Amino acid sequence: MEIVRPQSHRNLFSPNDAVSVPTIPLYRSAPPLEVRLEDFESFAIDRLRILKGISDGMSRGKKPDEMEKLVKESWKVHMRHQHASEVLNKDIISHFVLRLVYCRTEDLRKWFLSMECALFRHRFRFLTTEAQRAIMDEFDLTCKAVSNVEFENIKEKLGQVARSMGQPSPTVDTIFYKVPFEEVPELVAGRKVFISQGYAYVAMNQVVSLVATLFRSQLSKTLILTNRKWTASIRDHEKHRLTPIVEALSSSYLGPDFSQPREYAEISLKDIDQVAKTSFPLCMRHLFDKLKEDHHLKHGGRMQLGLFLKGVGLNLDDALAFWRAEFSKKIGLEKFEKEYSYNIRHNYGKEGKRTDYTPYSCQKVISSTPGAGDQHGCPYRQFSEENLRAALSRMGVNSRAMEDVMDKVRNRHYQLACTLTFEALHGVTCDAGINHPNQYFSDSQKILQPKVD
Amino acid sequence: MIPQQESEFDIGYLKPYYGKLFPYADMFKWMSYGHDGKHPGCDQSYFGRREFSYTLKGDFYLRFQSFNSALELENSIKEKCPLKIDIGPVYTVDPAKRHAYAQGDNKVFTPVERELIFDIDMTDYDDVRYCCKGADVCLDCWPLMTIAIKVIDASLRDDFGFKHILWVYSGRRGVHCWVCDGKARRLTNEQRASIADYFRVYKGNENSHKKVSLMGAALHPFLATSYTNVLKDYFEKILLTNQNLLATEERYEKILSMIPDESIASELRGRWQDNNRRSSSAKENINVVRWEQCKQLLQSGKHKAQGLRRCVEEIVFFFTYPRLDMEVSKHMNHLLKAPFCVHPKTGRVCVPIDPNRCDEFDPTTVPTLFQLLEELNNEGLRADVNGEWSGTSLGSAVTLFRSSFLEPLLKACKEEIERSYSLKLQQSKNSIGCSSKR
Ligand code: SF4
Ligand SMILES: [Zn+2]
């Protein structure tokens, strides 16, 4: 590993107080440490466990406070070290090892980036205000604090924003930071900040979004650089030592992978109407029915259903035939071939240079934002009560189960609502819960057509 | 209803239009963003990395066209005579040569700049207009587009600080918006999405009845400003009566269904059914009278419940607030029809709209191809220095494009090029100064 100076002295790490990790390193340069080969690997695996835990939690749709707890506990379990003073080193080393592991393709980088950022966010929240300030200093943020004069001028607007989120109006003591709106996309998207003339006014309690964005863009850039270094030199240089470890580590990533159809593969075109009735979750059933009805689906719907069908095991030729049969009824064969077939092939990785697209998880479906005319998204979240009831009774949910389902919906537990629907229709309990539309499908098929072997 | 003049359009008319009227030089200047100059800071490859695409007769698409000069652009359009020209992003490399660069995982061919665009289409408003449906528009529903322009334009300027914004009539039933500031062109997809979401108030889709939900004890300043400056007046003074929003039972039921308090809804229903039977005084517009009653009940002191306080606003938002096609704005590589194209169904030219005077814009008087060619014939071949369009009704459209959009834009671009050039000089000086350290 390259040897570089340690990070800035501002990392207020004191070896005697390792339990309440007082700050987070920003991983700006690789550690100047000698690392034993076993540590190299085992530290990385420990960190990977934490990141995977976060990934699972997110795909289960865990709420922020549940995530908070999950991260805190998993950090404590996996990052401990027999010498408390070594925790910071372990943190830094494990990060840099995984950076090597996950720099090598775009998909890996994407996953690593979002998990590390989620981890960073949660850890940032645990910090004392002082430690938070120190990190903000590192990102040159403290100088962007809004002056009292400026605050007085806009305090009414700041108050409006706070009240629109159900919070009390800020007082002079509340610190605001003025930054280009581009740096806080998530606060902009949620209208959680006042924006004027290109600047967003970020309150101290929102600063985590800002810092996380900066952390993210820093990490994203360095991942690309690491990738270059990896291909240019490290890989060959470390051929006998680190490279095999790095390569092995990456194949141990992520949870169940629905991009390749699994044991019940190969649903053929003629069965599809049948299995749609018995084994599609409501989100897919709705798209399927709409497609048959309108002979058209907008982009979001085509992606959601198309990738699901791929995961279910519909091969490319059948998929093309399926979409063609519907779309051509409305727009004609020629237009279909010109405008839509490309996309379907693309989803199967046949056109363009991209790797396979992966079917959407519940979390992704639920968080999508269908606009006017769109049919995708999770019906438990999107439908009006009336429409949802109608749709569920069409699926065959009886009135007793219906109330339980609606109850979950009202409390915004969409995946639980879907799980209860599954249980009502299949007459079994489903303890793992529904986390993925393709899991709904395969669990359903397992019950309906027990494997004969 | 606007006579859509479907029969008027004849592809044969496009040849003389592209031959004599289409403003190539202006389009080229715009898409060059100052890089066509002599300044050493100009990036001469800039225009050539922009994707254009054509829709030709017989629904034939040509994507990834690119040109190195105004003349190349002009010759190609004259030769191909496209029904529609779309403009895509600026890529890392010339899009026509993209295959040469497509190797492996490293994405050499990828979009790097693109205007921030918005597409607003009247078909998304079918549940709030009763005059026409689908592709048709008339002067009774067009105010919905005027509202969209006003709300979005004000926020782009005041909130986001953008200055170079072009609004264009889409030729039939909507408007397009191009935000062209350098800062806007360089936004990432995530940042684009955040702006689009900032503008979004509709939750869900056609499957949820109550589309707008405004929670919290106050409206966000952007929504509050839009409401008081635009939405409220347009709703009460124009749409309420234009669209007869409360005139029949079916229509008022739609509004009553948005009131969460059943007792208020049924009280209003009672009154309105009653005065359906009674011959109304005819003097006052029934929509206005009913709206006043509705507001009065909802805002009267005894119903200060949190949910009800927002209800009047929610109704107004539902019937007026802009409905954007989100996907178009969120991704850099979405194509959008070029201004000054001719809509193949209506024959109308996609002319710019002045956002400061958008309430005067009348889609029914936008020049059609047919009309332009007639004017051209009548004028004879009196070529003006400005181009032949100056003698036709396209003249004012091109003048507007130049004076309110292109000229200020190019001035800003020149300044930006100079600024970044001198910064670069400065940096290279510094790095030479430091190089001994390495
Ligand atoms: S919970 Fe998941 S599987 Fe069920 S409908 Fe929603 S997205 Fe589909
Ligand atoms: Zn109309």
Image (cartoon, grey):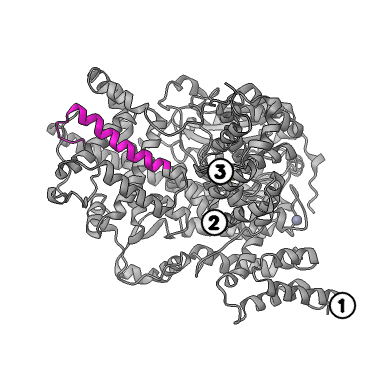
* Between discs 2 and 1, the one toward the N terminus: 2
Q: Residues within 10 Å of mark 1 (few under 14, many from 20)?
A: few
Q: How far apart are marks 2 and 1 (CA)?
A: 44 Å
Q: What residue is drawn where x is 73% and y is 73%?
A: B266
Disc 3 to disc 2, how far (Cα)?
Answer: 53 Å
Residue A253 visible in the snapshot: yes
Q: Residue A429 carries which label?
A: 3
Residue that label 2 marks: B153
Q: Do labels 3 and 2 share a chain?
A: no
The amino acid beneath tag 2 is: Asp
Q: Where is residue B359 in the image (x, y as percent from the top left)?
A: 65, 61
Image vertical order of residue B408 relative to residue B43, above or below: below
**Hey, what amino acid is under mark 3?**
Thr
On the question of residue A306 being in view, the answer is no
Assess whether residue B431 is covered by the magenta stretch: no
Q: Which numbered disc covers residue B279?
A: 1
Q: Quadrant of ligand 1?
A: top right
**Residue A32 belongs to the span the image colors magenta:** yes
